[in-house]
Amino acid sequence: MGVSLALQKLNTALESAGPSGRICTLGPIIHNPQVLADYAARGVVCVRDVAELAAGDVVVIRAHGITREVERDLHESGVAIVDATCPKVKKAQIAIGRATARGECLLLFGEADHPEVRGLVSYACGPAHVFSNVDELAACAPPPEESCVLASQTTQDKELFQDIEKSLRSRTRNLTVLSTICDATRERQEEARHIASRVDVMVVVGGKQSGNTRRLADVASLCGIATHLVESAEDLRAENFCKKTRAGLTAGASTPKSLIDAAEVWLRAH
């Protein structure tokens, strides 16, 4: 849903663009190279910094959201802003701000270098720690008597998050847990797990920079079968499917249907 809305807003900006100024995105609007290449061909400019923008530009905020500091800089720059932040991400940002309003420590389950995570952390009103596994959590967890808030990147695995919550509750006296994992992400992961349990090789189609796509591949791999993450059918190799009788296919949230269909055609032909 967040990906679809972001692309709809970008398409609307393109359709209503005037003769002057540019249509820009602040960072890749989604993590899919084929989609990004298509928009670049249509004249969309991907900038990395607010300083690259000029008067008259229309800036579309990416689906992953941005930090509070960057948002402030955008408003001060005077450019026209279209906020395409996924509603689930925006909800998580607001929830973190409210839950840490008195300076509580934020513990965020996610990828520290992911743009969504950087945005979420910027809403914390107290200290914030990002961890991607239980070992990293152990290294940053506050003392038992300290109040803390547990939240997650919206595309993380819900079962892992629930295990982390149980572990923290056993040693933290005052813990607030925010439900920030997207239901659509959870359902897609459950479907991937179900498919992987019934096949002997799995294909996940999507951008390799996409966090939710990589997690789908992780979920399938944990079922103990060969799993191949590819960006398009051209990345598939026949030798990886020798002696395999049943293949499973799924895709990341930002993967165009045309790429999924092409992978299906390739698999059926091999």
Image (tube, grey):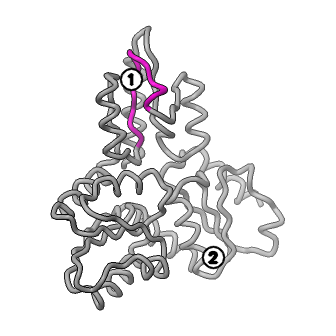
- Graded by Cα atoms within 10 Å as few (under 14), some (14 to 19) or many (20 or more), the crowding at tag 2 reads some
Which residue is depicted at the point 51% across and 69% down? 192
Per the rendered image, the range of residues in magenta is 50-62
- Answer with mark 2 or mark 1, whichever residue precedes in sequence: 1
Q: Quadrant of residue 58?
A: top left
Q: Which residue is at a point 38% across and 67% down the rendered structure image?
A: 129
* Element marked by disc 1: strand
> Is 266 within the magenta?
no
Which residue shows up at 42% across the image and 67% down it?
A: 130
Number of marks in the rendered image: 2
Write down the residue under mark 1: 58
Q: Is residue 41 left or right of residue 67?
A: right
Amino acid type, callout 1:
Val
Does the magenta-highlighted stretch encompass residue 54?
Answer: yes
Mark 1, Cα crowd under 10 Å, few <14 / some 14-19 / many 20+, is many
* Quadrant of image for the C terminus: bottom right
Q: Position of residue 19 (x, y in %)?
A: 44, 8
Secondary element at tag 2:
loop
The residue sitting at the bottom extreme is: 170
Q: Quadrant of residue 184?
A: bottom left
- Give the residue drawn at x 50%, y 56%: 113
- On the image, the x and y values in percent for residue 208 come to 61, 54
In depth, the one of 145 and 4 nearer the eye is 145
Q: Are marks 2 and 1 in contact (CB under 8 Å)?
A: no
* Residue found at the very far top of the displayed protein: 19
Label disc, if present, on residue 199 of the rendered structure: 2
